[in-house]
Image (cartoon, rainbow, N blue to C red):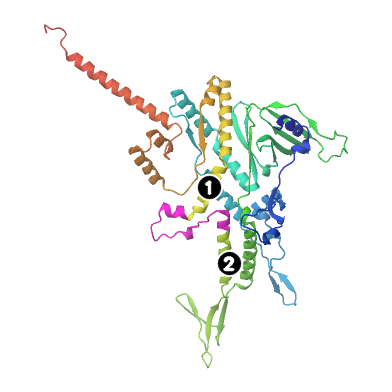
Amino acid sequence: MPDFEDLKKELLGSPEKLMQKKPFYRGVKEPRDMSFLGLDLLINQTVQAEPTTLKVVPVSQDQFLKELDPASHDVLFDENVPSITMKTKDGGWVDIKFSRVAVPFQKIIVRKHVLHLTGNKIQHSLISENPDEKTSNNFMRIKQMWNKRNIDGGIRNMIKTQKSVGDAGLLFYFDRYGKIKCRVISYKDGYVLCPHNDPNGDRLLETIVYDVEGTRYIDTYDDKYRYRWTNSNVSGTSGDGTEVGWKWHKPVEHGFDEIPLITKRGDVAWNEIQSEVETYEVIYNVFLAIEKRHGWGVLYIKGNYDDRGKKLAGNIILNDTSIDGNGDAKYLTPPSPEHIIQTLDKIEDNIQKGSSATFILPKDIRLSGDISGVAIELTQSLDIENGMDGAKEWQNVIDKAMRLFKYGLAKEMVATGENPMAVTEYELTEIESEIRVWRPRNDNEYNQMITALTGAEVLSKETGAEVNTLSRPDEKARLAKQRQKELENEARLEEDKSQKVEDFQPKNQNE
């Protein structure tokens, strides 16, 4: 069994090791030698197993940022894309102003992925089969504060960041008022995430590397402390007499019972179709250059005309005065490059397939017939399938976010005196949280379905109140309060009825 504490001490004692990070990569350099497959093998014969020999091509997160920003696409600076020139009267050539165009496919794909993962609020369910009133109230309080602190928004920004730059972090913390909150740690903001696992693959330490005014910080989190290294001269030279080297700071308790930083890494949303996007942009810009140079029509007039023209119904009428009468006038346009347009359409289809992102524009909707929600849902089946896969992939992040928020909120309740037993009670309140993949639907039809299922007792009224699109986080409490008022009114009516009957009773038998 490996000694995890010795491994942790080794990492914490070396800033260089804390800054080690597995790179992102795209493609390979050298494939495995598969020459043994050419041999004649028996059906039950085996071959010698060997570790992989693939050499991957690393790609920096700066490259992801360039690909995400249309203003930084390579096509804008590609001198191989043809320009437009015009011959002048003196025999020289002059460039015609022509701006290249970048297409923001990457941003569109990121938005589509994020929409299907975060278009619906995260759904919370109480695991206990027969919860008591205290547990139900605690569950309702946790959900209310989750919405009030916009933890859904933090998770959405985390997913968007990971889909944009490859990795992202969500740091839970207590603000200066002691309230539990979270914020996104992003490479776009200058933070580099360096997670460290134990030999079993479980997270041992989470490290953030960033620079502030020339000073490099290394913040590392474990289950109890936040550790910090700083270096005020990261270049390693001391020209101004300042101290060179790393400085260790006293560890600070972060206040949680586990690492308060959640990290997630994976491929960017457009990783599989970057080459198609680059090809599309090159062909598109060549097409635009040709259209701008040769795409203008020409008014062609043939015959013998004088300068006097007659105007009829707003049009100029020219009469041909030539003897043969072969005059003609027509507007000539260049042939349409259909093959280029078809190629661009085909590449766009491949981009949608490879990225699991469907681009539906108003021109794609035919209003002549009835379009059902099922039909639209089928057109976005790639998006929905990708979202369902992503929901499972992000489940660990959602679970840890709920654990950290519950623990932080419990400590906040204890500190404010609202619930001195919140730490114990919230720990016993087991909540299951999961992403509900967004898909096109009609809210009226959805609510009618929920009402029908509730009336048929397939769903409980409590569940119907919770999943209905018009419900509020405290909907069950409102229903309970409403039911309590109804019971009180019924009891008051019964009491009034009994009082009236009693008033009509004789006071004594002689009467």
Q: Is residue 23 above or below residue 471?
A: below
Q: Residue at x 75, y 77 (%)?
A: 91
Amino acid type of disc 1?
A: Gly
Q: In front: 162, or 289?
A: 162
Mark 1 element type: helix
Q: Is residue 202 visible?
A: yes
Q: In front: 324, or 410?
A: 410
Mark 2 element type: helix
The residue range painted magenta reads 351-378
Query: Which mark, residue 343?
Result: 2
Q: Residues within 10 Å of mark 1 (few under 14, many from 20)?
A: many
Amino acid type of disc 2?
A: Thr
Q: Residue reaching furthest bottom?
A: 323
Q: Quadrant of the N terminus?
A: top right
Residue 271 screen position, x and y as percent: 63, 53
Q: Quadrant of the C terminus?
A: top left
Estimate the spatial distance between the alpha carbons at disc 1 and disc 2, rounded to whole Å. 29 Å
Tally the numbered discs.
2
Q: Is residue 61 above or below residue 458?
A: below
Residue 387 screen position, x and y as percent: 53, 47
Q: Residue reaching furthest left?
A: 510
Residue 110 screen position, x and y as percent: 58, 50
Mark 1 — residue? Answer: 387
Indicate whether residue 375 is drawn in magenta.
Answer: yes
Query: Which mark, residue 345?
Result: none
Q: Residue at x 58, y 38 (%)?
A: 396
Residue 455 screen position, x and y as percent: 33, 38
Q: Is residue 213 visible?
A: no
Q: In front: 39, or 9?
A: 39
Q: Nearer the viewer, mark 1 or mark 2?
A: 1
Indicate whether residue 348 is drawn in magenta.
Answer: no
